Image (spheres, rainbow, N blue to C red):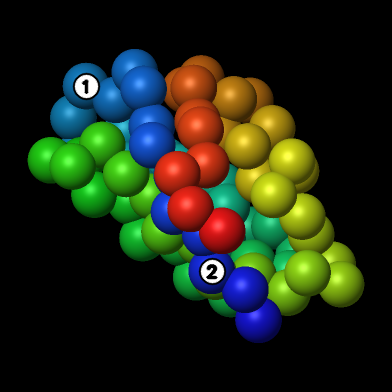
Amino acid sequence: MKKIKLKIEGMHCTSCAMNIDGELEDTEGVKEAKTNYAKQETEVEFEQEKVNETKIVDIIKKVGYKAHIINN
């Protein structure tokens, strides 16, 4: 398992955070996603064999937000 933290741009409310978490957690290989609206950040725990950082960023973009990895 690997954990990454991402900075999220474009969230306007806690529903935005829930949308990101729901979409990520529906992705095979993602164990847990915790998005904090107040901090504008997401922490994602995932299996590297099934999903990678690029796919996670792409999923967040698909939902309508910008994401940048802030640690590995």
Residue nearer the viewer, 10 or 68: 68
Residue 4 left/right relative to 27: left
At x 26%, y 36%, the residue is: 40
What is the three-letter code of the residue carrying label 1? His
Counting other residues with Cα less than 10 Å from the Cα at mark 2, is it few (<14), some (14-19), or many (20 or more)?
Answer: some
x then y, percent, for residue 39: 18, 42
Circles 2 and 1, Cβ within 8 Å, touching? The answer is no
Question: Looking at the picture, does residue 31 appear above or below residue 43?
Answer: below
Where is residue 41? Give x, y as percent. Answer: 32, 44
Who's the residue at 74% across and 41% down the image? 54
Is there any visible trace of residue 17 in the rendered image?
A: yes
**Direction from residue 38 to residue 11 in the image, left or right:** right
Q: Which residue is tagged 1?
A: 12
28 relative position to 32: left or right: right
Q: For this rendering, which residue is in front, 39 or 11?
A: 39
Q: What element carries label 1?
A: loop
Other-residue count near label 1 (Cα within 10 Å), few / some / many at <14 / 14–19 / ≥20: few
Name the front one of labels 2 and 1.
Answer: 2
Residue bearing the label numbered 2: 3
Mark 2 is on which residue type?
Lys
Q: In which quadrant of the rendered image does the N terminus lie?
A: bottom right
| Residue appearing at x 24%, y 49% in the figure | 36
Q: Can residue 22 be seen in this view?
A: no
| Residue at the limit of the structure toward the right, as seen here | 49
Name the quadrant of the C terminus. bottom right
User: In this figure, what is the number of numbered marks?
Assistant: 2
